[in-house]
Image (cartoon, rainbow, N blue to C red):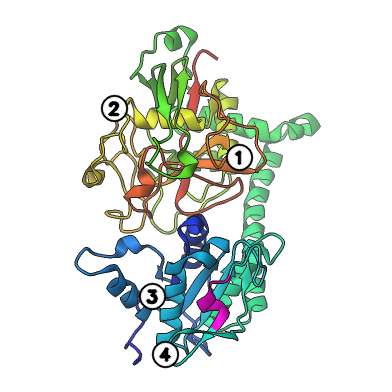
Amino acid sequence: MSEPAAFKYRAFISYSHADTGWARWLHRGLETFPIDKDLVGQETATGVVPSALRPIFRDRDDFTAGKTLTEQTLAALDAAQALIVVCSPAAAKSRYVNEEIRLFKSRYPERPVIPLIVGGKPDDPKSECFPPALKFKLDTGGQTTTEADELLAADAQEEGDGKNLALAKVVAGLIGVPSDEIFRRADRERRAALRRRRRVQGLFALLVLLLALGGLLWLEGPYLFEQYHWFTAMGPNVLKPEAERALKPGSEFTECTGGCPPMIVVPAGKFMMGSAEGVGLDTEHPQHEVVIARPFAVGKHEVTMAEWDACIAAGVCPPTSDMGWGRGARPAMNVSWDDAQQYVAWLSRHTGKSYRLPSESEWEYVARAGTTTLYSFGDDEAALNDHAWYKGNSERMTHPVGEKKPNAFGLYDVHGNVWEWVEDLGHPSYDGAPSDGSAWIEGVTSDHMMRGGDFFFDSSFLRSGQRYMLPSNFRNYSVGFRVARTLGQ
């Protein structure tokens, strides 16, 4: 098989449908992995070290309708410099994964094949994770033999390498650099970022000290600085009780001139949460009725960079990268669940009102806005272009909020742009979920839920019922949030 003139993909990720979440994590981790500038341009066994590992092939939705699945799979494999196999008991049983491995190894035996274990163990009769074509060598006809193929695997499981080291090992395999060096350089960059953050925090602390007048004022310095910023820069405009009681569904209000998101009042009501049998993923079942007993307010749009920057200026929220795309009206991103909690706590302190993240059921209630269809506007995926920034139109970046059509409640960007954190802990299904609209905060995991999809994903991830979970300290350029506010408190 002759080599193509240039590779279209840095790697092809082969995975079972059951491991889609792991494949998404790996795809994002690789495409955003910071290659140390000192390594870029070096010659290694796999070629010249690139400045970024993009693009990585994962999404079969890139295929067109004009050719067969086999033809397009072969074309993608041929155009990939390496093959990464997400290994698990499900992958070991998948004939599609096995065939992709067999085709790649038989056509390009000199190209790297990199296993990433996410479940099970090799050679374990109860939880074998290697497909046969990965585990054994091929004969000259491209068929699996009984001779073991020795491969170095990365293990993302906690009892193995863990996610960070496993990702470093995969990167090392792609660029031909020892994994310990990749991990050490990435760790050095993380430590440098932490030092930069601490320097910024130190500057704020110094300013507080300069404003302090004596020991008592020094102890109250951070709070006084927030108050000073609030009254001089943000300008409070908190709703008085009589004005709050007069709010009706559809009413809009903002409780300061800067930093407070515009809020929309949504009515009480009930809806069927989740997806009907045969629709969506297992995580969206069982479908169940939820009753929202009282009106509440929710952000008209996702919290913006400008609104987040006001919290940074107050010395409360951590600085975040905008990836060079711009700030202002673009949605805040690279925000963890923990970071979002700092923001809503800050708003609550200064307004005396109950700002918070919406519960997952509140989020789906306002996103559906009275509909039972796949999206808030119906079932037609073609209409997404009018309502959302997603893979089909975003050019792989965020866009200013409010540029697409709102849903029936007057909310913008409930589909796409960035994923939105909600209050609830992560759960793999709705078994035992609350039915009163409250957050589900009992669980066995520290992960938290996020909703709405983002600019990077295709239409299937933007459905009103789609849900996803990640650790509370996870930050990414496609993750942000919108706020909610309890009324009458």
In the image, is residue 412 above or below residue 255?
Answer: below
Badge 4 or badge 2: first in the primary sequence: 4
Disc 4 residue type (three-letter): Gly
How far apart are labels 1 and 4 at the CA level? 63 Å
Query: Alpha-carbon distance for marks 4 and 3?
Result: 26 Å
Task: Look at 62% across and 75% down and name the residue there.
Answer: 153
Would you say the residues marked 3 and 1 are in contact, meaning their CB atoms lie under 8 Å apart?
Answer: no
Q: Residue at x 34, y 39 (%)?
A: 413
Quadrant occupied by the C terminus: top right
Vertical arrangement, residue 174 with respect to residue 422, above or below:
below
Query: For the magenta stretch, what is the residue range?
Result: 130-136
Amino acid type at circle 2 is Ala
Q: Which x, y percent locates residue 438?
A: 55, 24
Where does the N terminus fall, quadrant-wise?
bottom left
- Is the Cβ of the residue at disc 1 closer than 8 Å to that at disc 2? no
Name the foreground residue: 71 vs 179. 71
Q: Which residue does the numbered mark 1 point to in the structure image?
A: 316
Cα distance in 3D space between marks 3 and 1: 41 Å
Which residue is label 3 attached to?
9
Q: Residues within 10 Å of mark 1 (few under 14, many from 20)?
A: many
| Tag nearer the camera, 4 or 3 | 4
- Lower sequence index among marks 1 and 2: 1
Find disc 4 in the rendering and name its residue.
141
Choose between 170 and 350: the one closer to the eye. Answer: 170
- Give the distance between the C-alpha atoms of the residues marked 4 and 2, in whole angstroms: 60 Å
Q: Is residue 52 above or below residue 208?
A: below
State whether residue 145 appears in this view. yes
Q: Is residue 354 magenta?
A: no
The residue indicated by pointer 2 is 408
User: In the image, which disc is placed on residue 432?
Assistant: none
